[in-house]
Amino acid sequence: MTEVFNKLHHLEMRRELRQQSTQAEKLFWKQVRSGQLGIRIKRQVGIGEYIVDFYAPNIRLAIELDGGSHFEIGTAERDADRQKNIEVLGIKVIRFTDNEVFDGIDDVISILRNAIEERRRSFVPKNFS
């Protein structure tokens, strides 16, 4: 089986990303860590050749926080390709901007709760072995 999650060559990069979390990631993590939403969420998880900001493995839900760099020329296309490649694996990707996190964390958490419930209802685990 091809290794899909947390490839060894991403180990150091994932550690660095956790240590250098953005302010939006820190605020978001404070709201979702330790099973506060009734589901385990991990930070900086490798999926294929990508590293996603947050990931709920039990329901295969990736959560991305888009800061200023995501609005530069060409980035939208790369983000779309990245998302498509992740979703091919049966993983749903949900995105929030940093501004959404800062200006309305309660709304972000509400949207996330709804997405979690939707995934729980519709999720059928895939066997990748």
Image: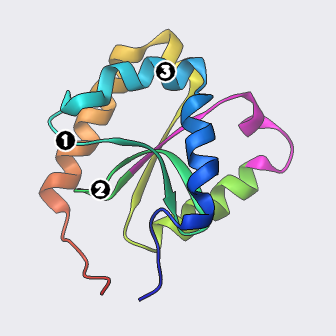
Residue type at tag 1 = Ile
Q: Which residue is mark 1?
A: 39
Residue type at the position of mark 3: Lys
Residue furthest top in the image: 103
Quadrant holding the C terminus: bottom left
Local packing at callout 1 (Cα closer than 10 Å; few below 14, some 14-19, many 20+) is some
Going by the image, does 65 lie left or right of 13? left
Residue 50 location in percent, x, y?
Answer: 60, 60
> Which three-letter amino acid code belongs to the residue tagged 2?
Pro
Asked if residue 110 lies left or right of residue 17, the reply is left
Residue 71 highlighted magenta (yes or no): yes
Which of marks 2 and 3 precedes in the sequence?
A: 3
SS state under label 2: loop
Does the CB distance between marks 2 and 1 fall below 8 Å?
no
- Residue 49, position as x, y percentages in the image: 61, 67
Q: Are marks 3 and 1 in contact (CB under 8 Å)?
A: no
Question: Distance from label 3 to label 2 (Cα)?
Answer: 20 Å
Looking at the rendered structure, the secondary structure element under dot 1 is: loop
Quadrant of the rendered structure where residue 82 is?
A: bottom right
Q: Which residues are magenta?
A: 62-75
Q: Which residue is mark 2?
A: 57
SS assignment at label 3: helix
Q: Is residue 84 magenta?
A: no
| First in sequence: mark 3 vs mark 1 | 3
Depth check, front residue: 11 or 34: 11
User: Is residue 82 toward the left or the right of residue 94 in the image?
Assistant: right
Question: Residue, x 24% and y 56% (percent of image)?
Answer: 59
- Kindly report the distance in space between the C-alpha atoms of the residues bearing marks 3 and 1: 18 Å
Report the residue marked by disc 3.
26
Q: Earlier in the sequence, mark 2 or mark 1?
A: 1
The image quadrant where one finds the N terminus is: bottom left
Q: Is residue 19 above or below residue 102?
A: below
